[in-house]
Image (tube, rainbow, N blue to C red):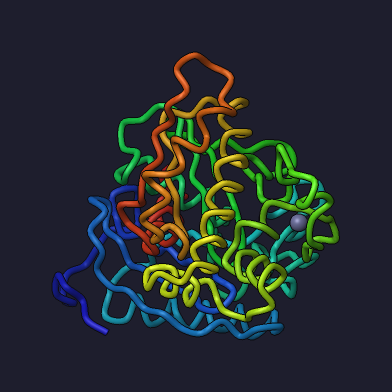
Amino acid sequence: MTLNGGSSATFRNDKNGLRIGIDLGGSKIEGVLMSADASEWTRCRVPTPRDDYEGTIAAIVDLKNRLIQGVAAEPRIGVAVPGSISPATGLMQNANSTWLNARPFDLDLALAVGMPVRIANDANCFALSEAIDGAAENAGIVFGVILGTGCGGGLVIHGSLVDGPRAIGGEWGHNPLPWAKPEEYIGPLCWCGRKGCLEAWLSGPGMAADHARVTGETYTAVELAARARDGNCAARATLARHADRLARGLAHVVNILDPDVIVLGGGLSQLSHLYELLPKLMSPHIFADQSSVVVRAPKWGEASGVRGAARLWDL
Ligand SMILES: [Zn+2]
């Protein structure tokens, strides 16, 4: 671990000081120590202790201690999580890292680190980061989408995160696939208990499962992308079905929120064909005479989760 700016400097623990951003993913926990001018001082990553609530909290404490090693300050901490804290119960909800659900994660984590923490949905943190100084900088209405092991969404309007009384603002992954074709209805079972959720179609595992259902072949989304690049017809067909479904899912959102920019994040945002295809595929479903929608790749990529989390104390 290194401090790019030198470890002897001290920083004020105030609005202009350092921030820690942590992105709690299903397979890894990433942390960043970021200064007020958004430059990154230190970055660390540890594996997520799966199915282990106490272990997950301990791993975050360890990560925080590694990040502040040699730093004479106690930076405020923001955490991106794969769900949200229910305002009604104070308990975690909707995490596909299901061992976090129904636990007072923010309070337990604050106790463990010895200071208050701010927690937000990981897709919200992604959207915030890309809206502030990323691919959607200066855009008024920004819809950020994470397509990875899950399928999340976050909404930022004029620099502010939009969330409501249920803490599910921007969530779209567990709505059903719109304009479903007969062969797509009712759709695959999702981990949330519903059938036909967008996440079950559009996430990496969702794409892989679709390929397996159609062809009988078992490949991961990464393998399918590589096979498609190599000209494999079945893999190309799977990516085409995925793009068409993603376009329908996004068009549904556009008809409600009318975003200036959609930014894609998560592992599947690296599929470069999406940026050319999506606007064309979405167009027939957009309820406007000007049906072109701006879809961009993320500026910060995987770093957007930690960068957005680090900014939660600045909102
Ligand atoms: Zn679902």
Between 116 and 198, the one lying in front of the other is: 198
Q: Position of residue 298 (x, y in %)?
A: 36, 51
**How many numbered callouts?**
0
- Residue drawn at the location 38% of the way across and 46% of the way down: 275
Residue lying at 59% horizontally and 28% vertically, measured from the top left? 285
Residue 2 position (above or below residue 17):
below
Quadrant of picture, ligand 1: bottom right
Of residue 43 and residue 50, the one placed in the foreground of this image is 50
Answer whether residue 80 is visible to the viewer in this image.
Answer: no
Q: Is residue 76 left or right of residue 193?
A: left
Residue 310 rendering spot, x and y as whole percentages: 41, 57
Residue that appears at 49% across and 14% down: 289
Q: Is residue 286 visible?
A: yes
- Residue 37 spot, x, y in % from top left: 23, 50
Residue at the (60%, 53%) spot, across then down: 152
Direction from residue 246 to residue 7 in the image, left or right: left
Residue 80 higher or lower than 97, as above or below: above
Quadrant of the image containing the N terminus:
bottom left
Q: Position of residue 238 (x, y in %)?
A: 57, 62
Residue 117, image quadrant? bottom right
241 relative to 62, above or below: above
Against 270, is 162 above or below?
Answer: above
The C terminus lies in which quarter of the figure?
top left
